[in-house]
């Protein structure tokens, strides 16, 4: 990296800070634990990763995993926060001592006091550039506050700095990322863990540098953005890079290059930020059965977190078998019923579980096509599936149930899909914010927000848009309002009245742009991930819009009206 700094005409160094962010799911952590008559531990816990809960509980109580059963539950919201195991251990020891089932439900005061929010961070970015705006080097030093205990995934800090260099052509980079113990609440995962912090720092610094060089932030980004044939800063060779197309689409939709509206007593600004994120990997098993009544049943060990992926999995299955998705039954496996399931998170479900369902459905299709060929002499390459019927040109159709009844009453297929992360595929997101800043109070009002996404085939448009809307809303809270306060290590923000998540009146005009990629992604039918990348560039886009409006550099989020007013006053008075 020193070579890159030696090649630079100018070197910029800035320090940025982010605070905790709670996932703010509606349902708090809850569990039931008891020892059954055989001495096995039975637990119901609203965790999105039941097999990890089983493993962690096994290690914590010194009992083999075969003696522990994690039973299926539905989950009232997750956003990354339901992957821990804060309650099952307590329930076990209490149940063992009392001989009774133990039910534990955290109050929301307890959630805010002792949940597992997003890590706060202090990040110093040092970037070298030439006078024409070419970036030659970047060095990042990140310190993430993990709180008081090791239990909540401190190892994630190894990857938390992976997006410090952004999607830019930076030939020389160096990243030091640390997770440290403090006397604050233990931290865990939240939507796109680690990314919103480092992307905030990197994208805000991009605007600060552009301002010093006298360049438009848009042109500065375009000059350095990776394109087809370029390696990423970390050496990945992405194919069909969509960054520039996504950026251009966002700029057009946001009217970025048009004159900004002017309002008396307000300062108006526009800001942008860009990021990329991988499509998740892991392991998932799906089983599909069809009985002699034609009932299609899907079996999965994935807990329902409320994000709508059960609908997507049914859609995939229905598409392959010619059955309406809402006629497909779904059965939820416990940890006894399948060897392993990675769980929900990491933008993996539509990819990994979707492929498991798709391939199990393909196997069932092959079985039924072969049966139809044997029974009726239908050509295998012309046999199809539609509206619960098996069809062939010029032939009377036969129902799924009727065909299955000839096989003994039940057909089934099971597939386990194991996937490592595909380093050739990434997904781009560009966000552009427009804000009004009240000159007398420092109050920031978002007037318009444009969110552009690089997508493949969208399987569920309503659910897809819901992920974008939710990501943007959480990003707005991260940037402006959500602030966990502490006094000597104790959380003092102990209600949702004090911890202010955005509500619908806080939402600006939201414009969504979907930029279709010809090559698609790794999910069935060529879809790409959408669940996490939408949050990461919201805060820097808003802070860059504030900079554009006021000329004030806000290096710490959330940006309260009080903080901004004081910064504006300091700039005005030169203090």
Image (cartoon, rainbow, N blue to C red):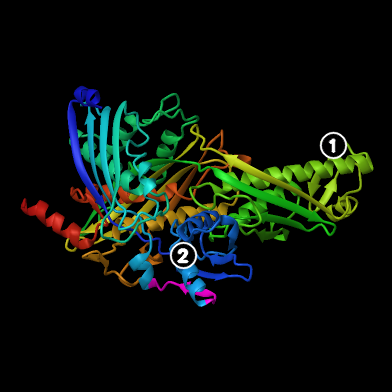
Q: Give the answer, above or below, for where 308 lies relative to 256.
A: below
Q: Nearer the viewer, residue 316 or 370?
A: 370
Magenta stretch: residue 188 in it? no
Residue 285 rendering spot, x and y as whole percentages: 64, 48
Q: Nearer the viewer, residue 102 or 474?
A: 102
Q: Nearer the viewer, residue 63 or 559?
A: 63
Q: Of the numbered discs in the image, which one, if any, rests on residue 258?
A: none
- Provide the residue span drawn in magenta: 99-108
Q: Give the answer, above or below, for where 442 lies relative to 155.
A: below
- What count of labels does the image hold? 2
Q: Residues within 10 Å of mark 1 (few under 14, many from 20)?
A: some
Helix, strand or loop at mark 1: helix
| Mark in the foreground, 2 or 1 | 2
Q: Is residue 245 left or right of residue 71?
A: left
Magenta stretch: residue 103 in it? yes
Helix, strand or loop at mark 2: helix
Residue 9 rendering spot, x and y as whole percentages: 18, 25
**Do we see residue 247 in this rendering?**
yes
Residue 396 rendering spot, x and y as whole percentages: 91, 48
Compare marks 2 and 1 and give the one earlier in the sequence. Answer: 2
Q: Which residue is mark 1?
A: 380
Q: Residue at x 36, y 63 (%)?
A: 506
Q: Which residue is mark 2?
A: 89
Q: Residues within 10 Å of mark 2 (few under 14, many from 20)?
A: some
Q: Nearer the viewer, residue 335 or 360?
A: 335
Q: Residue at x 93, y 42 (%)?
A: 376
Residue 302 rendering spot, x and y as whole percentages: 59, 55
**Do we see residue 458 in this rendering?**
no
Res 527 → quadrant? top right
């Amino acid at each position: 990296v020193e070579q890159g700094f030696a090649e630079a005409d100018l070197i910029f160094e800035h320090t940025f800070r982010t605070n905790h962010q709670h996932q703010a799911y509606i349902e708090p952590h809850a569990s039931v634990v008891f020892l059954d008559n055989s001495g096995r531990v039975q637990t119901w816990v609203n965790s999105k990763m039941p097999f990890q809960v089983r493993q962690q509980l096994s290690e914590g109580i010194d009992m083999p995993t075969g003696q522990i059963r994690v039973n299926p539950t539905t989950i009232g919201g997750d956003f990354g926060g339901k992957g821990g195991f804060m309650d099952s251990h307590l329930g076990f020891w209490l149940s063992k001592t009392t001989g009774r089932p133990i039910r534990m439900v955290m109050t929301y005061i307890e959630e805010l006091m002792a949940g597992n929010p997003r890590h706060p961070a202090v990040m110093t970015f040092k970037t070298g550039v030439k006078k024409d705006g070419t970036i030659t080097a970047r060095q990042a030093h990140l310190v993430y506050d993990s709180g008081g205990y090791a239990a909540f995934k401190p190892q994630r800090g190894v990857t938390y700095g992976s997006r410090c260099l952004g999607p830019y052509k930076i030939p020389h980079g160096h990243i030091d990322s640390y997770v440290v113990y403090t006397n604050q609440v233990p931290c865990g995962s939240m939507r796109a863990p680690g990314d919103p912090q480092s992307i905030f720092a990197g994208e805000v610094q991009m605007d600060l540098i552009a301002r010093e060089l006298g360049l438009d932030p848009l042109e500065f980004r375009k000059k350095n953005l990776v394109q087809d044939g370029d390696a990423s800063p970390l050496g990945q060779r992405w194919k069909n890079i969509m960054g520039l197309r996504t950026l251009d689409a966002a700029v057009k939709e946001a009217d970025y290059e048009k004159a900004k509206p002017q309002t008396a007593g307000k300062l108006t600004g526009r800001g942008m930020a860009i990021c990329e994120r991988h499509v998740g990997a892991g392991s998932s098993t799906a089983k599909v059965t069809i009985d002699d009544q034609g009932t299609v049943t899907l079996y999965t060990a994935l807990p329902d977190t409320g994000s709508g992926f059960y609908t997507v999995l049914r859609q995939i299955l229905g598409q392959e078998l010619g059955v309406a998705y809402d006629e497909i039954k779904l059965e939820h496996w416990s940890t006894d019923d399948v060897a392993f399931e990675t769980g929900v998170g990491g933008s993996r479900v539509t990819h990994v579980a979707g492929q498991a369902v798709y391939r199990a459905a393909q196997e069932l299709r092959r079985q039924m096509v072969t049966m139809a060929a044997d029974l009726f002499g239908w050509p295998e390459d012309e046999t199809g599936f539609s509206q619960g019927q098996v069809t062939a040109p010029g032939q009377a159709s036969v129902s799924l149930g009727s065909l299955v009844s000839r096989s003994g009453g039940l057909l089934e297929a099971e597939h386990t899909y194991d996937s490592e992360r595909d380093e050739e595929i990434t997904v781009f997101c560009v966000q552009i914010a427009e804000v009004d800043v009240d000159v007398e109070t420092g109050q920031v009002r978002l007037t318009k927000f444009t969110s552009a996404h690089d997508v493949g085939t969208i399987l569920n448009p309503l659910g897809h848009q819901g992920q974008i809307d939710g990501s943007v809303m959480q990003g707005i809270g991260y940037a402006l309002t959500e602030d966990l306060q502490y006094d000597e290590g104790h959380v003092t923000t102990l209600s949702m009245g004090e911890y202010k998540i955005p509500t619908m009146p806080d939402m600006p005009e939201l414009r969504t742009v979907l930029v279709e990629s010809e090559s698609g992604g790794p999910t069935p039918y060529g879809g790409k991930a959408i669940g996490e990348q939408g949050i990461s560039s919201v805060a820097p886009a808003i802070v860059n819009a504030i900079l554009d409006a006021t000329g004030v550099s806000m290096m710490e989020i959330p940006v309260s009206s009080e903080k901004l007013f004081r910064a504006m006053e300091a700039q005005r008075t030169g203090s």
